Image (cartoon, rainbow, N blue to C red):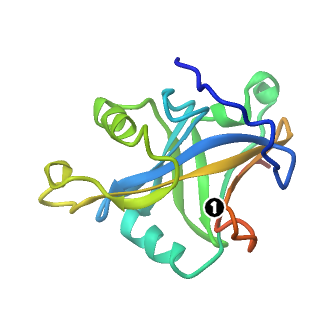
Amino acid sequence: MPAVNGNRSNETFIHGGTRITGTLFGYRKARVNLAFQDNPMCQPFLLLELAILTGKLLQEMGTGLNRIALECEKHSSNEKTKIIEEPIWTLFCNGKKTGYGVKREPTDDDLSVMQLLHVVSVAVGVLPNEMSDPHDGELSYMRAHFERVVGSKDSETYYMMMPDGNNNGPELTVFFVRV
């Protein structure tokens, strides 16, 4: 995986975490995907398919602060499994159970999206028409920097970092919890 050049020593983080890149993407009428990368040039270290339509999630995000909670059960074998390596999650969006989140390997299409967006640091948009699907609509995305905070072996949180000048807190927070 390629490394990023640059100095991030002057960046401040709210919760003392690590800065990463997060991307929500998907066809408007299909399930949304959530990818986290160490930097935009790397393959995702975590890719989840969430049981919520992309258009619905983008609509929810337009209303203000949003919370996605992904819960899985503790098992005796979890002692050596990192929380983000769990294969399936119960998904809650703004406190409402909305289905499941499933960890998966990136497809060639996913990697094409990541390649197209590798120069984008923070943006919301629609990818070119040739990437649209006649049934599922246009391919939308939202990309931002996230602060990754490891609370314990059973919890991690990803806080969307707002662009400079906006101190209203994160618009999106993603929680991973083993219960």
Q: Is residue 73 left or right of residue 103?
A: right
Q: Quadrant of residue 124?
A: bottom left
In the drawing, does residue 125 fall left or right of residue 167? left
Closer to the camera, 144 or 154? 144
Element marked by disc 1:
loop
From this view, report whether residue 84 is shown above or below residue 145: above
* Residue with the most extreme bottom position: 63
Tell me the residue at 49%/48% (across/down).
23
- x 74%, y 74%: residue: 168
Q: Nearer the viewer, residue 140 or 9?
A: 9
Residue 86 appears in which quarter of the rendering? top right
State the residue at coordinates (74%, 36%): 8
Q: How many marks?
A: 1
Is residue 72 something one can see in this rendering? no
User: Could you classify mark 1 by the number of other residues whose Cα lies within 10 Å: few (under 14), some (14-19), or many (20 or more)?
Assistant: few
Q: Is residue 154 left or right of residue 27?
A: right
Q: Which residue is mark 1?
A: 163
Q: Is residue 76 above or below residue 117?
A: above
Q: Amino acid at mark 1?
A: Pro
- Residue at the extreme top: 1
Of residue 16 and residue 70, the one placed in the foreground of this image is 16
Where's residue 102, x and y in %? 51, 43
Q: Give x and y (percent) for residue 148.
A: 73, 44
Q: Is residue 116 visible?
A: yes
Point out residue 35 in the picture as x, y percentages from the top left corner: 51, 42
